[in-house]
């Protein structure tokens, strides 16, 4: 049983530190979308060129995740997260010296992408799985909502800095904020309940600590991919989450501000609206975590993807230069659904290869999320250059979301071949 001397269970301290770190990480990832128009004005680079750096960032953010999950098991969560924050901080501060597109791709794309990927949502999944037995779905929802909180805080601030004080202030702000979190992790984030001499929150009296994996991090990540790829549910989760990333961070997260700017909306106003999506995202994601503990996660995912698809079909017709009611309806509707897919997806990932490898499996599924985001970040920019607007990109994403709503209902269903074999043997 947990030690009675703790008035607040140590799990909630781990939760609080993780929440702050993920909120800051979301702010770092949102910075490039704020920089698209300022960098275009400062250097004359095309949106496709600038978006390529963002695409690299999003891609590496995802590909790094499964290896980061294994590294956390091998070298401790604290070391990996502190190293990631230091990498992001140094990479961000170095952006003030860029003069060529490849500088932007190297720093924001590669360095910051790998750094943020090393403390991505696998960090949230890891903390939730280690520290919580009860309220796990709710905790995952709240940690996922940390991304929206960071977006809410950073987007208007960074946009205002870029507009009034120059784009270099964005890199300086992100870099300093990242480095400032390193001592917080060192001092307050404990590695596990066992390290604190306690048990996870809500653990039964006969709880036994699981054996931590001490294999080579790359081997563990690749082993999970190899074994998971043999499971139909792994591919259903992977494809659906690819669409999730394409329709959120890759498309709306990257291009909402420049798309709104195309319609005459001020950048700071557009950034504030995107941050407002984050407000409703917090509500939607926490509620999704609550529902995940009580409702079939496949049914939740069906409704999330279906409603998101419908909202994306409406977006091209409601981007106005001022705040019309329909714009705010989209902000509320889409915000509630932004990353509500994460809690049920994490829970379903635990069923692919078992709870002990659920975090690494989710790391690969999350990698697909970021591959989708990377495709949309660059693809939407190319469509904008080709057709002069983002309408086709929004329509394509809407269609894919409707397809994902069907895919998720197939999770957990036996294949037709297995059903036929069962009927024959009966």
Image: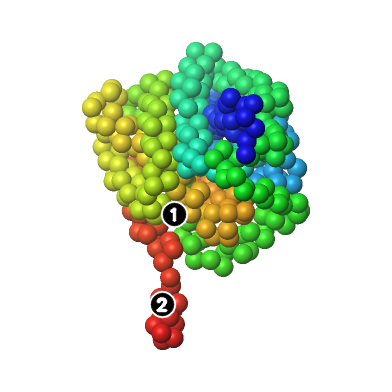
Q: Position of residue 235 (x, y in %)?
A: 50, 61
Residue 294 to residue 331: above or below: below
Q: Residue furthest left?
A: 325
In the rendered image, the quadrant that contains the C terminus is bottom left
Q: Choose the circle earlier in sequence order: 1 or 2.
A: 1
Image quadrant where one finds the N terminus: top right
* In the displayed structure image, the side of residue 271 where residue 57 appears, left or right: right
Q: Label 1 to label 2, Cα distance in Å?
A: 24 Å
Mark 1 crowd level (few <14, some 14–19, many ≥20, 10 Å Cα): many
**Which residue: 44% across, 63% down?**
412
Circle 2 Cα neighbour tier, 10 Å, few/some/many (<14 / 14–19 / ≥20)? few
1 vs 2, front mark: 2
Q: Nearer the viewer, residue 420 or 291?
A: 291
- Which residue shows up at 71% across the image and 24% down it? 187
**Residue pictured at 44% horizontal, 86% vertical:** 425
Name the disc covering residue 419, or none.
Answer: 2
Q: Position of residue 19 (x, y in %)?
A: 55, 30
Is residue 333 in view from this perspective? yes
Element class at badge 2: helix
Mark 1 highlights which residue?
240
* Residues under numbered marks 1 and 2 in contact, where contact means CB atoms less than 8 Å apart: no
**Which residue in the rendered view is the most extreme toward the top?**
164
Does residue 17 show up?
no
Task: Choose top left, top right, bottom left or bottom right for residue 130.
Answer: top right
x, y percent for residue 389: 36, 39
Residue found at x 37% / y 59%: 409
């Amino acid at each position: 049983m947990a030690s009675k001397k703790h008035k607040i269970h140590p799990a909630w301290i781990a939760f609080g530190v993780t929440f702050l770190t993920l909120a800051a990480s979301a702010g770092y990832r949102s910075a490039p979308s704020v920089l698209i128009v300022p960098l275009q004005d400062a250097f004359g680079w095309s949106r496709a060129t600038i978006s390529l750096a963002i695409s690299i960032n999003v891609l590496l953010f995802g590909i790094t995740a499964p290896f980061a999950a294994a590294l956390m098991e091998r070298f401790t969560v604290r070391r990996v997260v502190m190293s990631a924050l230091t990498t992001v901080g140094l990479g961000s501060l170095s952006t003030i010296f860029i003069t060529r597109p490849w500088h932007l791709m190297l720093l924001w794309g590669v360095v910051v992408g790998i750094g943020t990927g090393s403390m991505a949502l696998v960090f949230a999944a890891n903390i939730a799985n280690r520290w919580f037995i009860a309220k796990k779905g709710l905790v995952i929802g709240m940690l996922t909502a940390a991304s929206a909180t960071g977006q809410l805080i950073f987007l208007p601030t960074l946009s205002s800095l870029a507009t009034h004080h120059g784009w270099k202030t964005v890199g300086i702000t992100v870099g300093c904020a990242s480095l400032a979190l390193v001592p917080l992790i060192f001092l307050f984030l404990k590695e596990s309940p066992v390290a604190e001499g306690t048990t996870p929150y809500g653990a039964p009296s006969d709880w036994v600590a699981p054996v931590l994996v001490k294999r080579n991090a790359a081997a563990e990540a690749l082993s999970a991919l190899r074994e998971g790829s043999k499971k139909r549910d792994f591919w259903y989760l992977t494809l659906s989450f690819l669409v999730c990333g394409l329709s959120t961070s890759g498309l709306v997260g990257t291009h909402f501000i420049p798309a709104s700017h195309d319609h005459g909306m001020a950048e700071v106003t557009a950034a504030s609206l995107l941050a407002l999506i984050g407000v409703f995202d917090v509500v939607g994601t926490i509620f999704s975590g609550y529902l995940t503990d009580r409702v079939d996660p496949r049914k939740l995912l069906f409704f999330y993807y279906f409603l998101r698809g419908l909202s994306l079909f409406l977006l091209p017709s409601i981007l106005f230069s001022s705040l019309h009611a329909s714009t705010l309806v989209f902000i509320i509707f889409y915000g509630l659904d932004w990353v509500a897919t994460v809690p049920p997806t994490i829970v379903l990932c635990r069923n692919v290869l078992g709870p002990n490898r659920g975090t690494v499996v989710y790391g690969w599924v999350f990698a697909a999320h970021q591959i989708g985001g990377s495709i949309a970040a660059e693809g939407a920019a190319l469509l904008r250059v080709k057709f002069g607007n983002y309408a086709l990109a929004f329509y394509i994403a809407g269609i894919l979301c409707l397809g994902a709503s069907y895919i998720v209902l197939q999770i957990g269903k036996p294949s037709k071949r297995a059903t036929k074999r069962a009927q024959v043997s009966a």
